[in-house]
Amino acid sequence: MATLEAFIRVLGFHIILITQQKFIQGYVDQNTIYDPCKSQPTLIQDAITIGVAFIGDITTWYNNSDVRSNVLSPCEAPLADKLTNIGFISIFRPQIDQLTLLNVVHGSLISLSDTFAQTVSLLLYAQGMNTTILAGPRSFMNSYGTVPSFTTIIHFQNGFLKNFTWKDDECLDCAQSSMCLDNNCVDPQDRCTADSTNSSSCHFSINLAFSGTDRKKKPLQSW
């Protein structure tokens, strides 16, 4: 299992992301694009550059803060300018067709909670063939607690990113002490603050899987 760390320094502190995945034997990454706002035709052994952006209230992601409007893109103004001033962006590079776990470490969650008054949302983005592909905004933290994890399917068509699909748990298996936020279970905050030294007591992760075809039309099979 290989571990990669991605750091970004905004507003005076680091958000630390840890990406975990198993690499294919003989792994050779031929994707030299490290900007999630640039097009990246990929093969199975390549990595894809994905941006993850954090901000406070989920309405910030929408045009005129209206959730019925189109989602703004981190690759275009005005959201790009807004994120520079009040948000956080980090870049990670999962290998195509390898199950990947992206972890936001305990200390970074505390920093996000303090910065955004306990209300935090995120958005994933990367460039497709002709446009930026967005994973619709998701709230994952509020005053009650934190969603432990999300799952998203990354779909490719002939090597180009086609779409992201969130796989919500629909709150079907929430514990009695949990609440539901955007169709996902939220673990109560006291579970985190009761043992702040134990990173497993307060965590957030994104599980990634892949579907579709690479640029040689080879099928992706991790989902």
Image (cartoon, rainbow, N blue to C red):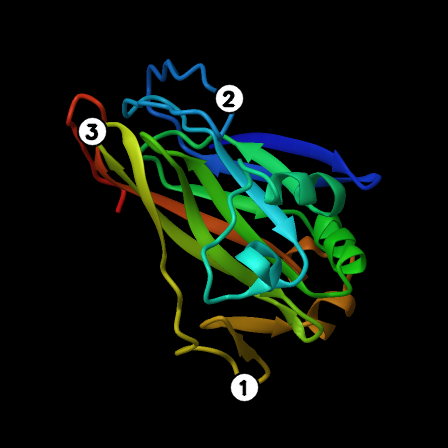
Identify the residue at image location x=31%, y=23%: 42
Helix, strand or loop at label 1? It is loop
Residue 196 percent across, percent down from the top left = 78, 60
Chain-order first, disc 2 or disc 3 = 2
Helix, strand or loop at label 3? It is loop
Location of mark 3 (residue): 158
Label 2 vs label 1: CA separation? 43 Å
Label 2 vs label 3: CA separation? 20 Å
Identify the residue at image location x=51%, y=80%: 175
**Nearer to me, 152 or 187:** 152
Front label number (1 vs 3): 3
Tag 1: amino acid? Gln
Identify the residue at image location x=54%, y=65%: 66
Tag 3: amino acid? Asn
Front label number (2 vs 1): 2
**Residue 204 position (above or below residue 134):** below
Helix, strand or loop at label 2? It is loop
Chain-order first, disc 1 or disc 3 = 3
**Nearer to me, 191 or 34:** 34
Location of mark 2 (residue): 34
Residue 148 in sight here: no
Location of mark 1 (residue): 176
Label 1 vs label 3: CA separation? 44 Å
- Which quarter of the picture shows residue 117? bottom right
Q: Which mark is residue 165?
A: none
